[in-house]
Image: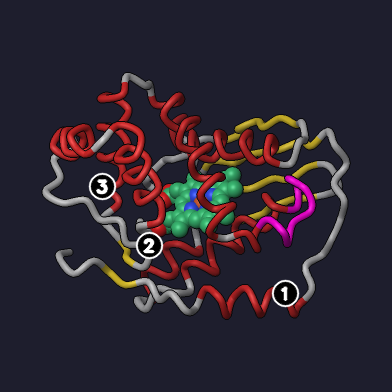
Amino acid sequence: MIGLIQRILIDHIEEAYGEETLAAIRQRAGLETLGRRIDTDYADADTLALFAAAGEHLGLDHEAMMTRYADLFIRWTRVHYPMFFSLAESARAFLGRQPRIHATLGAGLHDETLKARVNDKFRVVDEDEATLTVEYRSDNGLCSLYRALFLRVLEEYGETGEIIEARCRHRGDECCRFVMHFETAPARSPVSAGAGVLLEAELKKVPVTREARE
Ligand code: HEM
């Protein structure tokens, strides 16, 4: 998984709990090193092991870990990728753009297989003014992260809404399907082509590479 995901967790553990705790979590995860380069693709298994070990060490169950992480993630991305937020005037608009945000980040990958892996995970399958339906396909099974981020994005925009997971890989379905309802009417603000080009240009400055040791 692109290193941005684990970087945010690693930095948080180090800052909030110190280097010893970080080392203990790394050991518990069975990892020799911790990669936090946002331009590198790390093994999914390592990222998942890190989340599990962090939750166990900090006494957080999986859902609580994802809620904590969603908060860290939104704070971090707000600072480092402010344009993603300024381009979307509502939670509905932001979440509708999320698959494209991922695809834009995946565009930094040189390996076509990896690029497709990132691109193919999320798809908007239905939308109108107040609802959005997104499908998520990934062996990582991080629908809990999606749900936590949905709630945190609502909070960020000062909106209310609900998410129903109509299908879920953990229940044996072929994919996870999130049906989201937004109670605050979204202020529609289509992104101008110019802004999209600018955004892509910014991101392409950071090519993403496969970690050397893999
Ligand atoms: C500024 C906004 C965002 C950025 C920069 C961002 C970036 C990323 C990146 C780089 C990954 C790793 C992708 C990979 O290696 O395959 C990722 C994974 C993920 N993101 Fe986002 N994301 C954003 C917003 C969101 C939002 C709003 C949601 C959900 C509501 C979301 C849900 C997820 C999930 C569930 C994964 C795990 C995918 C998997 O490997 O199965 N992201 N994100």
**In screen coordinates, is 99 left or right of 175?**
right
| Residue holding disc 2 | 38
Label 1, label 3: how far apart the Cα atoms are:
35 Å
Q: Is residue 164 visible?
A: yes
Residue at 34 percent of width and 40 percent of height: 15
| Residue holding disc 3 | 45
Amino acid type, callout 3: Ala
Is 69 colored magenta in this rendering?
no
| Residue holding disc 1 | 195
Amino acid type, callout 1: Ala
Which residues make up the magenta segment?
Answer: 85-93
Q: Is mark 2 within 8 Å of ligand 1?
A: yes
Whichever of callouts 1 and 3 sits on the residue coming sooner in the sequence is 3
Q: Are marks 1 and 3 in contact (CB under 8 Å)?
A: no
**Which corner quadrant holds the N terminus?**
bottom left
Label 1, label 2: how far apart the Cα atoms are:
23 Å
**Picture coordinates of residue 48 (x, y %)?**
30, 42
Are there few (<14), some (14-19), or many (20+) residues within 10 Å of tag 2?
Answer: some
Amino acid type, callout 2: Ile
Q: Is residue 183 above or below residue 37?
A: above
**In screen coordinates, is 95 left or right of 203?**
right
Are there few (<14), some (14-19), or many (20+) residues within 10 Å of tag 3?
Answer: few
